[in-house]
Amino acid sequence: MNNAVIEHATTQPHPSASIAAMNDAIIAALRTVYDPEIPVNVYDLGLIYRIDIKESASVDITMTLTAPGCPVAGEMLRWVETAVRTVDGIDQVEVNLVFDPPWDKSRMSEETQLELGLL
């Protein structure tokens, strides 16, 4: 199962149903972005560490890469930003790249591990 943490700002919270719907839409958008070296989307690959939905129609995404030297790192961050900006109600997206904790195959969804023959 993917280990992305979903956080919500507390100053002016959205109704729960609205947050859940927005979160589902963000995850769907993230699933349209594929790692160019592994034919799997960034969400199911486990590259998304945090989705932080804020009160002002903005979202912060914390993600990593499969390897620090990824040749398309900058492009992948833009792909994630562009995909999440397509979600209705989102006006601002910030994508933060981290390498701690380091990514490993255990962060992939079980379905993805089965698909890639890792289970």
Image: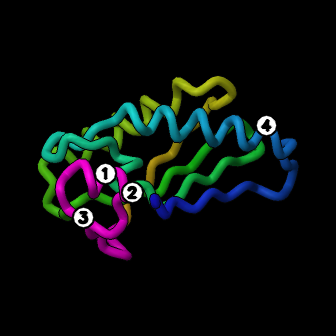
**Which of the marked residues, 1 or 4, is nearer the chain's N terminus?**
4
Closer to us: mark 1 or mark 3? Answer: 3
> Circle 1 sits on which residue?
112
> Circle 4 sits on which residue?
18
Secondary structure found at label 3: loop
Residue at x 63% of width, y 42% of height: 23
Residue at x 51% of width, y 59% of height: 4
**Which of the marked residues, 1 or 3, is nearer the chain's N terminus?**
1
Residue at x 60% of width, y 44% of height: 59
Q: Residues within 10 Å of mark 4 (few under 14, many from 20)?
A: few
Residue 69 included in the magenta stretch of the image:
no
**Which of the marked residues, 4 or 3, is nearer the chain's N terminus?**
4
Q: Residues within 10 Å of mark 1 (few under 14, many from 20)?
A: many
Residue at x 36% of width, y 75% of height: 100
Q: Please state if 111 lies on the left or on the right of 15 as rendered.
A: left
Determine the CA span between mark 4 and mark 3: 36 Å
Determine the CA span between mark 2 and mark 4: 25 Å
Q: Residue furthest bottom?
A: 101
Question: Looking at the image, which is closer to me, 89 or 15?
Answer: 15
Determine the CA span between mark 2 and mark 1: 5 Å
**Which range is magenta?**
99-119
Residue 3 in the image: above or below residue 101: above
Residue 10, image quadrant: bottom right
Residue 78 in the image: above or below residue 13: above
Closer to us: mark 4 or mark 3? Answer: 3
Task: Residue 94: give x, y in percent of width and height.
Answer: 51, 45
Residue 109 included in the magenta stretch of the image:
yes
Secondary structure found at label 1: helix
Closer to us: mark 2 or mark 3? Answer: 3
> Circle 3 sits on which residue?
119
> Circle 2 sits on which residue?
109
Q: Mark 2 and 1 residues: CB-CB less than 8 Å, in contact? A: yes
